Amino acid sequence: MDLLPIIASAGAAWLFGAVWYMLMAGPWMQATGLSDRDVDRKDPLPYLLSLIFLTLVAGMTSYVFVIAGVDSVSEGFWTGLGLGLFVGVPWMASSYMFAKQPMHLMLIDGIYAMIGNAIIGVGLTLF
């Protein structure tokens, strides 16, 4: 397992997350009940941990790709998207339902999980 594609793919998904949550900041904060005062954007820890977690996801996705023989960009995209849609989102949605989180928060975070994992899938097959 080569670390460069894992790290690069995690970084690409992380950058997508930065753009996604900048665009969705208002709806996301409304759904979570947080305000600008509650969110410390200067604290590096959530950003660093997010990158570490995405690296773990990319590492496991890489392992799945090796086992499944995923080796083209198209296969990487669809398998990554599928992992996000059929593994990440249902798991998250189950937790959100028990925590009584709003459906639109599940939608915002679920779309991020799906597209982020598709980006990881493409990255793993490109690098």
Image (tube, rainbow, N blue to C red):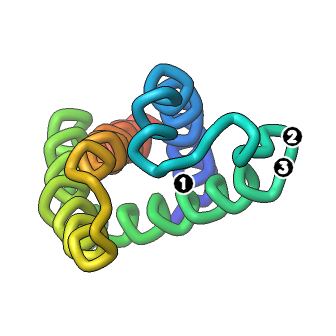
Please state which of the two labelled residues, at mark 1 or mark 2, is closer to the viewer: 2
Q: Nearer the viewer, residue 47 or 36?
A: 36
For the residues labelled 2 and 3, say whether their Cβ atoms are less than 8 Å apart: yes
Please name the amino acid that badge 3 sits on.
Pro
Residue found 22% across the figure and 65% down from its top: 93
Please state which of the two labelled residues, at mark 2 or mark 3, is closer to the viewer: 2
Q: Nearer the viewer, residue 84 or 126?
A: 84
Residue found 51% across the figure and 44% down from its top: 9
Please name the amino acid that badge 2 sits on.
Lys
Looking at the rendered structure, the secondary structure element under dot 3 is helix
Q: Residues within 10 Å of mark 3 (few under 14, many from 20)?
A: few
Task: State whether residue 95 appears in this view.
Answer: yes
When the figure is inspected, residue 11 is found, relative to residue 70, above or below; the finding is above
Q: Which residue is mark 2?
A: 42
Q: Which residue is mark 3?
A: 44
Q: Which residue is mark 1?
A: 6
**35 sits to left or right of 43:** left
